[in-house]
């Protein structure tokens, strides 16, 4: 490792200890609770993931929401559970791992109530009022209104869970009232609380249960554990929901009861808004002034990755602690890098919410920027360390998109001599094109981090203007060749609906997203159809680009809504709203049957009824095709490899099979981790996993 100057003295304030009730955090870096799709299914993988954050310097590291009672489960989502003593060991493993690296462990006890369809436990859900459960999937289940006895029971269950959390070793035991995901939020918000007893009506009444739960928790564990309160500052629903002024009044009523205030927005999609729809520090207007209501420390998130910005929000008196979920996922070592005076090495979160998609797809968290996320225990990967090279045989990486860049920098860190050949004149591949689209500028950080790392690696040489063909690769004669040449958008309509090329007349004006990204423009007033059979962000973005050009834009999709997969990144609602506001005409359930010179034929996905739509141009956003010519040509010349000194040729990333940028980065890392390893022919599972222990049958 190179020598690093000491940290910038302006950042000293970030490394001051802060007392939180009976415990003290060593610095102001605070990983707030965040979901991850691992939960009770992958407890050791999860414990290791949290441990790496502690190792990377986060003074406080929290769990995700932990379901603390069997009468409230949010199946199919996979979170942690603390239903009885048998759940303690898996939580203790996490707390131990966090302590090993000198950090405090926090646990967020959650009773989702109105958000819990109870598909696993099958109990009748309950909340402040009798309402349908508020799930993303509109489950046909209603919650019953809690009686006073239910309230007493729930207080007792929370208290018991707090005691169990302490036994598991946690230092901070949350009272969770945030995100419109918990009973305490539901009681607080007029939207959900229509009670007429002492728990409903006035703010004093709606805050009563939160107050009682805080008192219960402090009495149970407050002598040794801090009791933070996570609260929503706004539901962004206007007067129909919780607004900042009322949230401040609630905080005023409870001011000194919790040991820490953790400020969030509701719902989660507003709190963890993507960079396409919200800037770094976007929460600041909602947290301004809260510190004047309490002497207790305040933490809030804001997708902060810049040390200057962190110092400024503390100096301005907005918060005491820098809360982070996503910045700590993209770079678990962010605090250490600031401490060691090398902020330029921070792998900055790009705000894409691929991490969130882990929770929504019930699969282990992955991150676009940090390919080791979720693999710390499963594969033994580490965000900052990688085993040294096991041979002196150099590697040629062809293509400098996210896959090639990650492979080159990770191989360089292992100590291999690497040549990175790029056809164009800049690093980044698809990231360069896509980060110029509206709202995606932060995505260039995928390139910037890797470029910064490559510049520090003497063993990696980069060649631009180097479009390699099979002959030149054979001539070059590197023992290992990695083909990371990417993919192009198709123009023939092949995607989910058409699995063979669709009927397109020769003189039809068909454009692909690559055309628009590479500068093709259309005249104001041109009538354009975007057909989105890809369903992630690109179709919606193409419609946005065309609307910005002044085109009459029609967005057609076989799905029920715009960019439907972005439900998993919590963006769907924002995208559809933006397109509607820009005047894009949205046609759901629409298949494209044929493209002609002056129009298209579309049909209803259900009835097959067709309609003709006049157009000047059609943008097909359906799927991509790998640029694998080089790979195929090299495979075809395998007989020439020995003479050229080539041992292996592999295609990775989009050149092998197009997917997200996160997949490409992962593919680069996977290649680099595996080189000169044991090999993986698929006969054994190449990662560790935990299998539930069978219960005795007697
Ligand atoms: P991925 O997402 O898999 O990393 P990208 O499409 O982002 O793929 O990047 C592929 C990169 O490979 C682009 O920068 C492209 O210019 C480059 N490239 C494609 N073909 C060649 C080639 N034959 N020789 C060198 N570079 C190439
Ligand atoms: Fe940030 Fe995207 Fe990584 Fe999530 S997946 S932490 S949003 S870079």
Image (tube, rainbow, N blue to C red):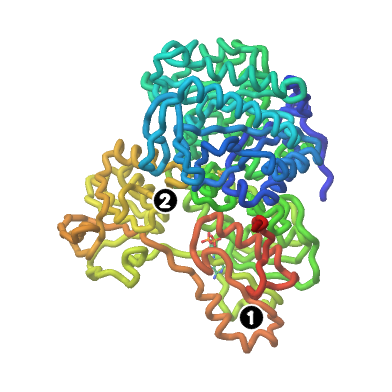
Position above or below: 257 against 161: above
Secondary element type, mark 1: helix
Position above or below: 377 against 55: below
Position above or below: 342 against 665: above
Residue marked by disc 1: 474
Work out whether mark 1 precedes mark 2 in sequence or the reverse, and give the earlier one: 1
Q: Residues within 10 Å of mark 2 (few under 14, many from 20)?
A: some
In the image, which is nearer the foreground, mark 1 or mark 2?
A: 2
- Residue 344 visible to an observer of this rendering: no
> Where is ligand 1, by quadrant?
bottom right
Residue marked by disc 2: 565
Any atom of ligand 2 within 8 Å of the CB at mark 2?
no
Any atom of ligand 1 within 8 Å of the CB at mark 1?
no
Name the spot of residue 608 as percent of width and height, x first: 19, 61
Q: Give the residue displayed 34% in from the left and 41% down from the top.
A: 576
Q: Quadrant of residue 558?
A: bottom left
Nearer to the camera, 74 or 481: 74
Name the spot of residue 526 as percent of width and height, x first: 23, 49
Q: Quadrant of the C terminus?
A: bottom right
Q: Quadrant of residue 346?
A: top right
Q: Give the residue displayed 80% in from the left and 62% down from the top.
A: 388
Q: Give the residue displayed 30% in from the left and 44% down from the top.
A: 547
Secondary element type, mark 2: helix
Find the residue positioned furthest to the bottom: 639
Q: Measure how far apart labels 1 and 2 are at the Cα level.
A: 41 Å
Find the residue positioned furthest to the front: 698
Q: Give the residue displayed 50% in from the left and 25% down from the top.
A: 150
Q: Is residue 528 left or right of residue 391?
A: left
- Residue 261 visible to an observer of this rendering: yes
Q: Residues within 10 Å of mark 1 (few under 14, many from 20)?
A: many
Q: Is residue 108 left or right of residue 493?
A: right
For residue 425, the mark is none
């Amino acid at each position: 490792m190179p020598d690093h100057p000491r940290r910038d003295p302006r950042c000293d304030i970030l490394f001051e200890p802060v007392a939180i009730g009976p415990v003290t955090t060593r610095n102001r870096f605070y990983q707030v609770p965040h979901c991850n799709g691992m939960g009770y299914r992958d407890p050791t993988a999860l414990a290791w993931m949290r441990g790496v954050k502690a190792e990377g310097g986060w003074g406080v590291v929290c769990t995700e929401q932990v379901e603390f009672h069997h009468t409230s489960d949010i199946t199919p989502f996979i979170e942690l559970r603390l239903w009885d003593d048998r759940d303690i060991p898996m939580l203790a493993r996490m707390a131990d791992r966090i302590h090993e690296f000198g950090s405090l462990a926090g646990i967020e006890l959650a009773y989702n109530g109105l958000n819990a369809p109870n598909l696993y436990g099958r109990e009748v859900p309950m909340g402040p009022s009798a309402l349908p459960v508020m799930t993303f999937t509109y489950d046909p289940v209603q919650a019953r209104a809690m009686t006073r006895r239910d309230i007493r029971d729930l207080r007792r269950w929370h208290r018991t869970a707090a005691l169990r959390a302490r036994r598991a070793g946690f230092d901070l035991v949350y009272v969770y009232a945030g995100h419109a995901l918990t009973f305490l939020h539901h009681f607080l918000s007029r939207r959900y609380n229509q009670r007429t007893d002492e728990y409903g009506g006035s703010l004093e009444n709606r805050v009563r249960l939160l107050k009682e739960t805080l008192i219960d928790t402090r009495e149970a564990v407050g002598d040794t554990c801090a009791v933070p309160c996570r609260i929503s500052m706004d539901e962004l629903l206007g007067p129909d929901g919780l607004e900042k002024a009322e949230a401040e009044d609630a905080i005023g009523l409870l001011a000194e009861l919790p040991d820490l205030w953790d400020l969030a927005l509701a719902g989660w999609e507003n709190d963890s808004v993507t960079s396409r729809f919200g800037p770094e520090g976007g929460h600041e207007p909602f947290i301004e002034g809260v510190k004047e209501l309490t002497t207790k420390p305040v933490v809030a998130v804001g997708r902060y990755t810049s040390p200057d910005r962190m110092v400024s929000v503390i100096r301005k008196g907005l918060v005491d602690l820098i809360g982070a979920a996503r910045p700590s996922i993209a770079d678990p070592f962010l605090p250490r890098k600031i401490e060691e005076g090398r902020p330029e090495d921070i792998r900055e979160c790009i705000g894409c919410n691929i991490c969130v998609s882990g929770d929504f797809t019930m699969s282990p968290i992955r991150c676009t920027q940090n390919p080791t996320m979720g693999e710390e225990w499963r594969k033994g990967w580490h965000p900052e360390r990688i085993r040294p090279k096991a041979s002196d045989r150099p590697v040629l990486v062809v293509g400098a998109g996210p896959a090639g860049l990650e492979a080159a920098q990770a191989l360089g860190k292992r100590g291999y001599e690497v040549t990175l050949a790029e056809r164009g004149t800049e690093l980044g591949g698809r990231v360069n094109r896509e980060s110029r689209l509206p709202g995606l500028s932060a995505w260039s950080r995928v390139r910037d981090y890797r470029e910064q790392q490559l510049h520090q690696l003497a063993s990696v040489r980069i060649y631009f203007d180097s479009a390699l063909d099979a002959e030149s690769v054979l001539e070059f004669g590197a023992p290992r060749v990695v083909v990371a040449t990417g993919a192009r958008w198709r123009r023939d309509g092949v995607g989910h609906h058409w699995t063979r090329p669709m009927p397109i007349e020769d003189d039809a004006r068909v454009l692909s997203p690559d055309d628009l990204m590479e500068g093709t423009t259309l005249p104001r007033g041109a009538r354009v159809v975007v057909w989105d059979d890809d369903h992630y962000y690109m179709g919606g973005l193409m419609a946005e680009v065309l609307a910005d050009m002044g085109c009459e834009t029609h967005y057609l999709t076989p799905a029920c809504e715009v960019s439907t997969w972005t439900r998993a990144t919590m963006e769907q609602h924002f995208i559809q709203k933006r397109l509607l506001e820009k005047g894009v005409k949205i046609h759901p359930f629409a298949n494209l049957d044929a493209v002609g010179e002056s129009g298209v034929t579309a049909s209803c996905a259900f009835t097959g009824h067709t309609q003709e739509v006049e157009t000047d141009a059609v943008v097909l956003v359906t799927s991509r095709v790998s640029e694998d010519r080089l790979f195929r040509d090299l495979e075809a010349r395998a007989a020439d490899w020995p003479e050229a000194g080539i041992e292996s040729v592999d295609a990775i990333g989009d050149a092998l099979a197009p997917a997200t940028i996160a997949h490409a980065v992962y593919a680069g890392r996977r290649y680099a981790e595996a080189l000169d390893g044991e090999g993986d022919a698929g006969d054994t599972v190449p990662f560790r996993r935990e299998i539930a222990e069978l219960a005795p049958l007697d």
